[in-house]
Image (cartoon, rainbow, N blue to C red):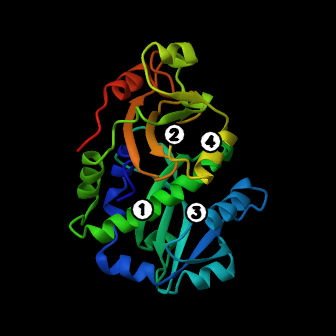
Amino acid sequence: MGITVMLLVISLKAQQTVGTPEQIEQFLKTTTYVVLESNPMLMYNSVIKETVEKHWTLTKFEFVTFSTEEFEKARMDPNKSFLIMNKEIFEKDKTKAKYNYLCVQLGGDYEFVRQMPDIASVPIAYDDVDEEFYIHKLGALCRFLQNHILLTQAHPEITNGKKAISYYYKNLTGDIKDKVLYLTKEDLSKQVDSEAKIKAIYPHKFKIVTREELQTAIDSHDENVVFVHKVGPEGSKRKARCFKTIVGAADAKLYYFSWHMIDDKNTEGMLAKDFKKLAKAKKKA
């Protein structure tokens, strides 16, 4: 499965992203090659290096650059795995949106990268969105990928995407009243674009923070913080979905998921109804 569907987005890809018990066992014995983008000017390259060094614990890791001879040789080796950014577009999605996924794949004798087994993946952004909108969240997303791999190892009954999605839906934590909800300004729709508007419908603790403050909470594994991971077009005028997931800064668990089609009334970001649902949420047994 893809990690969660962050959750609908992943459901489009779900048939590809559940590792078999044999693949998970194989992965845990590999060295993971963190694949850097070919463009050396991208901030992603430096940030993902720092992120993996802080947050990757499941396997040994090294770094390699995409499309180099070193990468092409390495990806043929079944003793290697890869943390890689892939672009995905789905035929059944009428919006024809293209997404960037952060994926964990296994090496082996495959002609193309897209044929390599994908054992975990998480959507990080629409393809044409600037990296500044997501690189500060990569630490939590890397931990989320590792959590997913360990989950599928512990629950071999999760044999396909639908079962994985069902598991995540049933186990959303829901109640965040004892947490501080971190929101960046781009996480908020026009309906709730100020502290006053949020306080009128959401009685629990929240804070509108900078990206730097959010990254600090993630890097320090702040147990008191949950945050919004939004996947949206970031101001684009085209027809698109907006996905909103709330993730724990410390545990990288899922607390909430929702999505909506963007229009003049329901603009990009958290809507009033999202905060109302969170206000009423009760912790699952």
Q: Is residue 160 left or right of residue 212?
A: left
What residue did someone put label 3 on? 55
Q: CA distance from mark 2 to mark 4?
A: 8 Å
Q: Is residue 1 left or right of residue 222?
A: left
What crowding class fits label 3: few (fewer than 14 Cα within 10 Å), some (14-19), or many (20 or more)? some
**Label 3 residue SS:** helix
What crowding class fits label 1: few (fewer than 14 Cα within 10 Å), some (14-19), or many (20 or more)? some
Which mark is first along the chain, 4 or 1?
A: 1
Q: Quadrant of the N terminus?
A: bottom left
What residue did someone put label 4 on? 214
**Label 4 residue SS:** helix
The foreground one among 3 and 69 is 3
Q: Which percent across, then down, holds residue 150?
A: 37, 68
What residue did someone put label 1 on? 147
Q: Which percent across, then down, holds residue 173?
A: 33, 43
Seen at 28% across and 33% down, the residue is 282
The foreground one among 194 and 186 is 194
What crowding class fits label 2: few (fewer than 14 Cα within 10 Å), some (14-19), or many (20 or more)? many
- Pointer 2 and pointer 4: residues touching (CB < 8 Å)? yes
* On screen, residue 70 above or below 170: below
Q: CA distance from mark 3 to mark 1?
A: 12 Å
Camera sees residue 152: yes
Q: Quadrant of the C terminus?
A: top left
Seen at 39% across and 57% down, the residue is 2
Q: CA distance from mark 2 to mark 1?
A: 17 Å
Which mark is first along the chain, 4 or 2?
A: 4
What residue did someone put label 2 on? 227
Seen at 68% across and 44% down, the residue is 132
What crowding class fits label 4: few (fewer than 14 Cα within 10 Å), some (14-19), or many (20 or more)? many
